[in-house]
Image (cartoon, grey):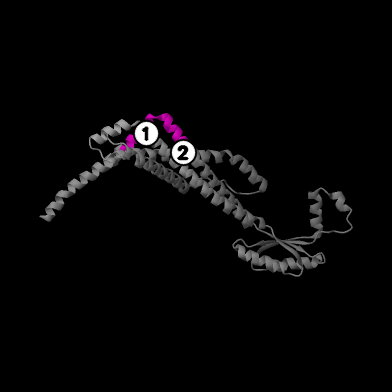
Amino acid sequence: MATSNRRRRRPGSGIHLSAYLAHHLQSLIFSLGKIYQAPATTLMTVAVIGITLSLPGGFYLFLKNIEAMSGDLRSSSQISLFLDLGVDENRARSLDEQIAAMPDVESTRFISREVSLQEFRQDSGFGKSIDTLSSNPLPHTIVVEPQLEIDRFRVRNLLGELQALPEVDIAKLDTEWLERLYTILEIAQRGVAIITALFAIAVLLVIGNTIRLDIQNRYQEIIVTKLIGATDAFIRRPFLYGGVWYGLFGGLLSWLIVELGYLAISGPLQRLNLLYQSEHQLITFSLHDFFILLTSSTLLGLAGSWIAVARHLKQIEPS
């Protein structure tokens, strides 16, 4: 007998589920039709959402490009060794060969005092003043290229080893400024996180206000629907899906704005790459980033509409 009862419930459950899903689909299409019938409101709302979300999206891509560029520069870090003025060229060249054989060194380049003075004369524009000097004030220089796979800690250790050599007067890591850059990037990342949170709240407010106005405009319709027995969940669904559509379209618009903005600066960036002989390519939204952007904007639309409906729908009751 119990088996018979279970068999009788299954068709009813299936019909109930089908009706439930059909109403969700109907609400999804109905909400799309509603926002289509109000093009001015829809365009303004979507434009505000798109512009608002494009700002943190643009900052995010900007940081990704800066991090990629600084990563390329880090991979070409160099240690410049300025030898003591009393070291002759033979001893300096011997030291160059000794350093090149060290395990963490990829390659070295020796620059003699004469070559350094000649390059300085050509690049500085003080050729006549340099000719008046009684002696060459520049030391022999060895440029050390660390191996690419070693980390910052080993580079620092290598710097200390080279600085301890008796022939070395000054050892300078040419990418020390990158440490400052990474600190600035960390601050910028936290700033972008704060901006993103604030703009997310702004999107919630925009969508919530739009749904609130939609609820007020459909006040009589909601009253009649409640009089014939409709539940709050039944009435709520079209408004929630309306927020989903606003968030989805706003996310698509923000993606388009950011992509067009970065396309506009691609030309100057290519010229900058040529000037610095860099192979860095412009980073735009990946498929993963695009999915996260649309998902986030859609969830913001759903959350904003839910807050508005939960607050204002209960205030509408038939008298």
Q: What element carries label 1?
A: helix
Left or right of residue 284, residue 297 in this image: left
The quadrant in which residue 269 appears is top right
Highlighted magenta segment, given as a residue range: 27-47
The quadrant in which residue 173 appears is bottom right
Magenta span: predominant SS is: helix
Taking depth in this image into account, of 270 and 212 the one nearest to the observer is 212
On whether residue 178 falls in the magenta region, the answer is no
Q: Residue 275 carries which label?
A: none
Q: Residue at x 50, y 46 (%)?
A: 196
Amino acid under disc 1? Asp
Q: Position of residue 100 (x, y in %)?
A: 69, 66
Q: Quadrant of the N terminus?
A: bottom left
Q: In this view, does 253 lie above or below 104?
A: above
Left or right of residue 40, residue 267 in this image: right
Q: Where is residue 218 in the image (x, y as percent from the top left)?
A: 33, 32
Disc 2 crowd rating (10 Å Cα; few below 14, some 14-19, many 20+) is many
Q: Name the residue under label 2.
A: 49
Q: Is residue 283 above or below residue 108?
A: above
Taking depth in this image into account, of 8 and 139 the one nearest to the observer is 8
Amino acid under disc 2? Ile
